[in-house]
Image (cartoon, helix red, strand yellow):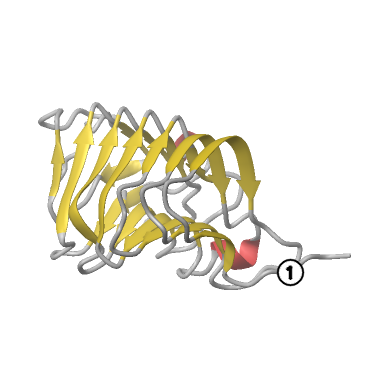
Amino acid sequence: MAVHRVQNFVTVSAQGCYFANFDVFNGFSTGDVNQIAWTDSGGRNCYDGVNLQGMGDAASAADTGSHSLLITGSTGENTFRNCTIGLDTVTRSSGVAEMALASGSPRNRFENCVIETFAGAAGCFWVAIGASGIDRYVLFRNTVFTNPINSTATTMTVGMSINAAPGGSVLLHNCLSSGATKITTTGLAYTSQGAAAAGGSLGVAIT
């Protein structure tokens, strides 16, 4: 028997929860649009050693409403440590982002994480932040952003789709990226590593 679930596979609407050491895979033999593996709308939750792998089928991987992770709502303040977000086994179509932040979500932190994708077009993204999608800041510390361009993936034009008025700052501290020409060309993004170096280490220009 096939299980078919549209949109949010798991939604966390509670606050103050601690999630550790498990994997979530969201993919169906008959896929659909708007598949989101994990949505956190509650805020002030902690994730440690959690793998959130969405868009595990061709249909959802071709839809811009699908994500491995969506953080939404005005509470925010979630912490992700030692987590893997995304999937690099199914090719993503242009406009698809592995994770998205929406509705003014403030002060989310990603520490020692891996954010991965498999871009089938230059217009794919690791992260998408729309207008007023965040508040104050989102912090990526010691985080690796990977798109396997040495394993047939397409180089992304920018790794992060950030609106010109995202509502806050995108902070990158001691991060590494591979598979995008630039981290972003719009929005307020700051890195601790200065100018770009040729193969990526936030070696790619911020703007």
Residue shown at the point (46%, 39%) measured from the top left = 47
Would residue 171 appear left or right of 158 to someone viewing this image? left
Q: How many marks?
A: 1
Give the image location of residue 130, x and y in percent: 26, 66
Would residue 62 appear left or right of 105 to someone viewing this image? right
Which quadrant, please, contains the N terminus?
A: bottom right
Residue shown at the point (42%, 53%) measured from the top left = 15
Give the image location of residue 112, x and y in percent: 38, 28
Residue shown at the point (47%, 61%) measured from the top left = 13
Of the pair 32 and 182, the residue shown nearer to us: 32
Dot 1 corresponds to which residue? Answer: 4
Badge 1 marks a residue whose secondary structure is: loop
Kind of residue indicated by mark 1: His
Seen in the picture, residue 132 relative to 171 is either above or below; the reply is below
Of the pair 131 and 22, the residue shown nearer to us: 22
Q: Quadrant of residue 88?
A: top right
The residue positioned farthest toward the right in the image shown: 1
Would residue 157 appear left or right of 13 to someone viewing this image? left
Is residue 123 something one can see in this rendering? no
